[in-house]
Image: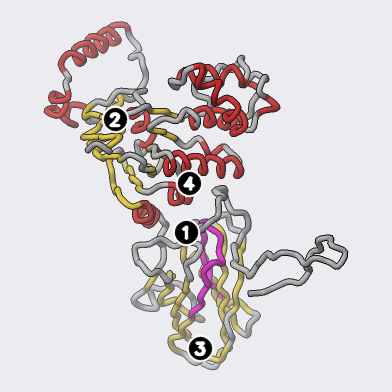
Amino acid sequence: MSDTMIQIENLSKLYRLGTIGSGTFKRDLNNWLRGIFRKNSDSPARLRETGENAFAGKDHLWALRNVTFDIKEGEVCGIIGRNGAGKSTLLKVLSKITRPTEGFVRGRGKISSLLEIGTGFHADLSGRENIFISGSMLGMKKTEIKKKFDEIVEFSGIEQFLDTPVKRYSSGMYVRLAFGVAAHLEPDILIVDEVLAVGDAEFQKKCMGKMKDVSHQKGRTILFVSHNLQAVNNLCSKAIWLQKGSIHAMGETQMVVNRYLGAFQKKMWKREWGSPREAPGNDWLRILSVELIPHLPNPMAPIDIRTPLTVRFRFHNFNNQIHLSANLVLFSLAGDCIFDVPSVSGDFNEGVVEGECTIPGRFLNDGSYYFSLFFLKDTSRTIFEYEECLHFDVEDHRENIHWYDKWVGAVRPHFPFTLRNGNVSNNGHGALDTRRHLL
């Protein structure tokens, strides 16, 4: 179709692993001759015929395997996946840095790539000189660079260090300048790898705004690789999930991100034992079951900061007329205590006792957590400790907030908090209204 900017079909990339030299001249010469033969004989058809059988084994790796998708004009496509999934290899093929082993890539228009911090920069030259060098390498004419020069400098925020050699720049200043040049090139296709992670919150907001402006207002296409799934959700209209070099899911961004998070969340959410003899415990009590129940509208969706959580447990009490209570304690993965909630105590006879506690949504911060249960007699004597009984992850979620860095704090409560205009005093000067309001 005429609005297709990038068309990829059956794209595969094979890498040979190991050292460059074999250790002996004879083997190096033999490998060199094999390489010449392979260049002449290993056409895509030949590679498909021999397939993985010819290159299988520990000496070779398929970084990409049969990747097929299209990107339309004006689309912002996020590419997600774990380290080693093939994301950077895909972008290098699209940027013509490396050639594919199989398949083909068709594209139209000018491509600008920002794959590494300070690509094309010369360490001994100043920021001013590197703007012209980097711009020229990315396809800009000198007149275009001069026209955009002030915008690039203002965007990157390095006016004070413009004539300083870039070898004295911090990594943040490097990426500010590099992204400033690439973003003002006005390409038809902008390819951005995980380089914005080194920027501060203000710069990340500026970059996201610039990419939105480039895609929405100017109709340009963006491929965005990031482990920051909040930024992917906020920026991208579609997403591709790469796993072990192949496309595992592709489609609407929220759907793909939810599937990705759901697949890798540590789901130790339920434990159950058939009989008290097999269950953890002692002569006082035995645990029969313990379960984490997230209140999710879609069972496939991941737990995020909005999700209420219910902990439900059952245990067998072996004593009559015993005064029992339980404490539910939440810890971060590092072992820091987030909270300790005691139950209402009561008198119980021998038999099954059930307990339940609900943690409201918009209380926990994103991160990894585990629960422990402590059972007490007479609210003072611990009779059994069931540590690390449930493990779970909480993912981030932000609405109308242009902040993509880690949200600080052990918890993230949603307290009533408002701002309002101050009153104007009789003398005409603005005065702050000190009244506080709760919704």
Asked if labels 4 and 3 touch by Cβ distance under 8 angstroms, the answer is no
Residue 360 within the magenta-colored segment of the rendering = yes
- Element type at mark 4: loop
Looking at marks 1 and 4 on the same chain, the residue that comes earlier in the sequence is marked by 4
Q: Amino acid at mark 2?
A: Gly
Residue drawn 56% across the image and 37% down it = 198
Residue drawn 60% across the image and 66% down it = 413
On residue 107, the disc is: 2
Asked if labels 1 and 2 touch by Cβ distance under 8 angstroms, the answer is no
Q: Amino acid at mark 3?
A: Asn
Q: Which residue is mark 1?
A: 393
C-alpha distance separating marks 3 and 4: 52 Å
Asked if labels 3 and 1 touch by Cβ distance under 8 angstroms, the answer is no
Q: Amino acid at mark 1?
A: Asp
Figure check: 393 above or below 157: below
In this image, 100 relative to 125: left or right? left
Q: Which residue is mark 4?
A: 228
Q: Amino acid at mark 4?
A: Asn
Looking at marks 1 and 3 on the same chain, the residue that comes earlier in the sequence is marked by 3
